[in-house]
Image (cartoon, grey):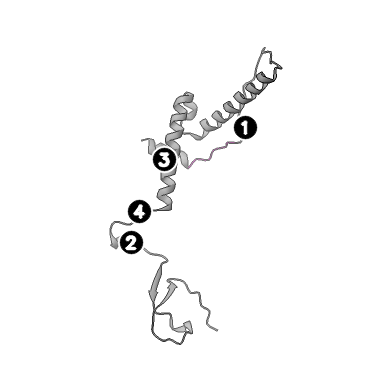
Amino acid sequence: MKEMMYKIAAMQPVDIDPATVKKPKRRNVRISDDPQSVAARHRRERITERIRILQRLVPGGTKMDITSMLDEAIRYVKFLKRQIRLLNNPPPPQDQASQVVTTSWVSQPPPPDFGGGGGGGGGWYKSGENSINSN
């Protein structure tokens, strides 16, 4: 169930521009001028902004508390890493009859118009591709 939700979410576009993240408006709050308080407030604001961006990236993140959302973010990143590994290294096909090869490197004698004297011996060339111009 989760993986299906992750797959759907991975295909959805997400706008993570920090400018679009709405900042809460403060009312009737006195803001301190103390440098330590200012630095702490900026740090909290950066953390809050990043949490909001992460909530938009994680499926269902806006409907969870921060702790649950961070746990879900970890699971989602692990899922995405597995998907990348699977897409980069697809598993070998189970039965040879269903295997379709569109372009592969094969060892065969060169085509007749290769121009190499035609003297036996195999050569390596890419099948399904005409890379020699005969003039």
Q: CA distance from mark 4 to mark 1?
A: 41 Å
- On the image, numbered disc 1 is attached to which residue? 20
Residue pictured at 41% horizontal, 65% vertical: 102
Residue pictured at 33% horizontal, 56% vertical: 92
Q: CA distance from mark 4 to mark 2?
A: 12 Å
Which residues are drawn in magenta?
A: 11-16
Whether the residues at callouts 3 and 2 have beta carbons within 8 Å, the answer is no
x, y percent for residue 95: 28, 59
Give the class, few, some or many, for how many residues have Cα within 10 Å of label 4's Cα (few <14, many ≥20): few
Residue 6 appears in view: yes
Amino acid type for the residue under numbered disc 3: Phe
- On the image, numbered disc 3 is attached to which residue? 79
Regarding mark 3 in the picture, which secondary structure is present there?
A: helix
Q: Hey, which residue is sitting farthest front in the picture?
A: 36
Whether the residues at callouts 1 and 3 have beta carbons within 8 Å, the answer is no
Give the class, few, some or many, for how many residues have Cα within 10 Å of label 3's Cα (few <14, many ≥20): some
- On the image, numbered disc 4 is attached to which residue? 91
Whether the residues at callouts 4 and 2 have beta carbons within 8 Å, the answer is no
Residue pictured at 44% horizontal, 34% vertical: 74
x, y percent for residue 21: 60, 30
- On the image, numbered disc 2 is attached to which residue? 99
Q: CA distance from mark 2 to mark 1?
A: 48 Å
In this view, 2 is above or below 31: below
Q: CA distance from mark 4 to mark 3?
A: 17 Å
Q: CA distance from mark 1 to mark 3?
A: 27 Å
Q: Is residue 73 left or right of residue 34?
A: left
Q: Is residue 13 rendered magenta in the image? A: yes
Q: Earlier in the sequence, mark 4 or mark 1?
A: 1
Residue pictured at 64% horizontal, 25% vertical: 42
Amino acid type for the residue under numbered disc 1: Thr
In this view, 79 is above or below 72: below
